[in-house]
Image: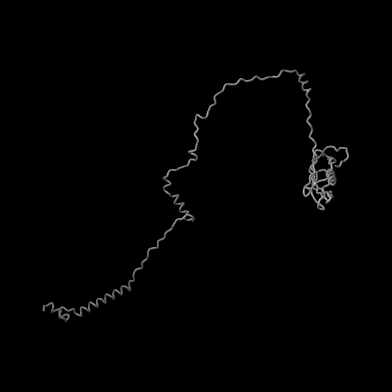
Amino acid sequence: MSAKSARRHALFGQEPGIIPWTLLGFILLSACVHAFGFYLFQAIYPPAAHIGPPPVQVSLLAPGTPEADAILHWIDSEDPALSVEPARAPIPGLMTLPYFPSYGKAHARPVMARSAESPLLYPDGASGLDLVKLAASHPTPAPPGPAPAATALTFSGPLKAASVDRMPLFDRLHEADLGELQPARFLIGVTGTGAVQYVFIQDSSGDKPLDATAGTLLQQVRFHPMSAPLTWGFATFDWGSAVYARPTPAPDAMP
């Protein structure tokens, strides 16, 4: 046995070549100490918090919403290609303009020769006495006067389509003061037999005696018999120029 083996045998008390129990105890104790240290390290120092990346988001610019339209307009206005591209102004009808040659239109008319003027023909002279005789032999006829217009009587309302059997003459309708006349309008009531029973003046002509005479003549009007017992309507006198003439002395005549 060598001196080294003797010292080992004296320290561990075993034969050389066999693992001593003391060394195994130290190894086991070291493993326990390391395990306890790892346990304390995990309890005292927890793992650091980890923040994951944000989720991926995709946004689409679809026209139709106010926000997307504003962004698309801004992109169109900020397009750098627009500043580089030359301006192109379309000329309407550029290829359809007709061609007119400059020699096709005369700018100066040629001066034509003057035509011979015909001499003026003057009548033969006449003396003053001959002119007087010529004027006296052809007297100027007086212009004919206007024909006297007749006074018209018209019916309106329910009596517009009614047939009249008898109409009086309007020779007695003459104005005394020769003033301006207005159309006279009467409200009349016609019985079932066609006789005018009621006469009420609505619009005066401006001459009371003329209105009274017109109302008297309205009572002489006869209509065709009607189905209703009493029919109301309007009668209007439109005065003619014959009203201003003098009344004739002949008596009133009925048709």
- Image quadrant of residue 47? bottom left
Q: Is residue 122 left or right of residue 175?
A: left
| Quarter of the rendering occupied by the C terminus | top right
- The answer to which of 79 and 139 lies nearer the viewer is 139
Question: Residue 52 at what x, y percent from top left?
Answer: 37, 65
* Residue extending furthest toward the bottom: 13
Question: Residue 31 at what x, y percent from top left?
Answer: 25, 76
Q: Is residue 136 left or right of residue 16?
A: right
- Compared with 30, 164 (above or below) is above
| Quarter of the rendering occupied by the N terminus | bottom left
- Image quadrant of residue 30? bottom left
- Compared with 246, 53 (above or below) is below
- Compared with 121, 221 (above or below) is below
Question: Residue 162 at what x, y percent from top left?
Answer: 79, 48
Question: Residue 182 at what x, y percent from top left?
Answer: 79, 43
Q: Is residue 31 left or right of residue 78?
A: left
- The answer to which of 6 and 97 lies nearer the viewer is 97
- The answer to which of 89 and 141 lies nearer the viewer is 141
Q: How is the image coloured?
A: one colour
Report the number of numbered marks.
Answer: 0
